[in-house]
Amino acid sequence: MTIDPRLSADAPASPLPENGLFLADVWDGLGARRKSLPAKYFYDAAGSALFEKITVLPEYYPTRTELRILDERGPEIAARLPEGAALVEFGSGSTVKLRRLLRHLPGLSAYVPVDVSGEFLAEQARVLRADFPDLPVEPVAADFTQPFTLPPSLSGRPLAGFFPGSTIGNFEPAEAARLLDVFGRILGEGATLILGVDLVKDRDVLEAAYDDAAGVTAAFNLNLLHRINRELGGDIDPASFAHRALFNEAESRIEMHLVSRVAQTVRVAGRAFPFAEGESIHTENSCKYTIESFRALAARAGWSALDAWTDTDGLFSVHALRRAG
């Protein structure tokens, strides 16, 4: 996702027509009794760059731990995919994790990356084709949270899905079950799904991962306010908000908030939103599971458990599921 070149980084601009959904979501979220903003708006160019920095922070264990599992247990994971399968990656993004798996999948018949950004997909596909000339790469520009049509060239091939990165945790359990059902309807009966799931662990480890000492996650969270100013004509002072990350044990999730340091009123595209001192904007959830609780969730969505792999410290898990017939 890129910032529109017509927008100055220093001065707010009038909202552009293509930002209509963004504006509607911001107005709805800030106008609610409990203020919130959708986490998907974190990822403009600046937010995406900050997230890449987060993934290599010493406190942020998920990325490096999942990569280690893919490296060490790759042959076992690959063995769960049928020979000649076409692999559909939902929300493909970077190909780093895919590449760790591809080395164990010489019989893969096609790779189908799915992402909302057609331009980004095209570039990733170009690079991947150059590095793996024998692997057909067929990108699909689509919102992976909604049903979409796979390329007709995949007809008759066994299908498998790939959803790494613990992204499933960004969805509330009911939403996560719905998403898993969407994946199942896209892939079809008997399909295999490989996905990453973050595990419940010590509160201090969890909270440090989302509130690092260097302040990178805080900058990532606060960038959402900068983006509103840039793209929607907001007049928000990001310095008047503080980043907060906490583990909500009752809901088994990390929550990220932006907390107003003072009583204030902010404006977005001409509409005013009052804040009391200490009032927060809920910006993200990251749900954590046990192996058993995630398998129960998957079963409600029509998937049966095949296997699960974890690191030696029990920080993260990679699951193999089978879609019921």
Image (spheres, helix red, strand yellow):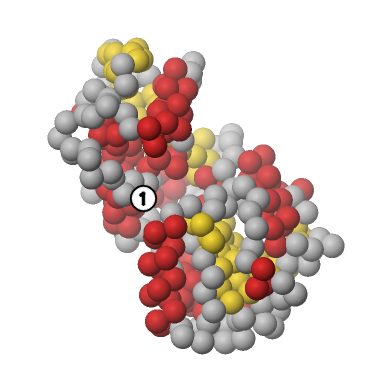
The quadrant in which residue 245 appears is top left
**Does residue 295 appear in the picture of this structure?**
no
Q: Quadrant of the C terminus?
A: bottom right
Residue 173 in the image, given as x and y percentages of width and height: 64, 42
Residue sitting at 38 percent across and 67 percent down?
123
Q: In the rendered view, does 36 fall on the left or right side of 169?
A: left
Residue at 58 percent of width and 82 percent of height:
105
Helix, strand or loop for disc 1: loop
Is 73 located above or below residue 171 in the figure?
below
Does residue 213 appear left or right of residue 130 in this picture? left
Residue 185 in the figure: left or right of residue 4: right
Q: Residue 84: x and y, percent?
A: 67, 82
- Residue at 67% in and 68% down: 152
Q: Nearer the viewer, residue 135 or 104?
A: 135
| 63 left or right of 106 in image | left
Residue 109 sits above or below residue 150 on the image: below
Check the image and report above or below for 153 versus 19: below
Label 1 sits on residue: 1
The residue positioned 33% from the left and 32% from the top of the image is 16
Displayed quadrant of residue 104: bottom right
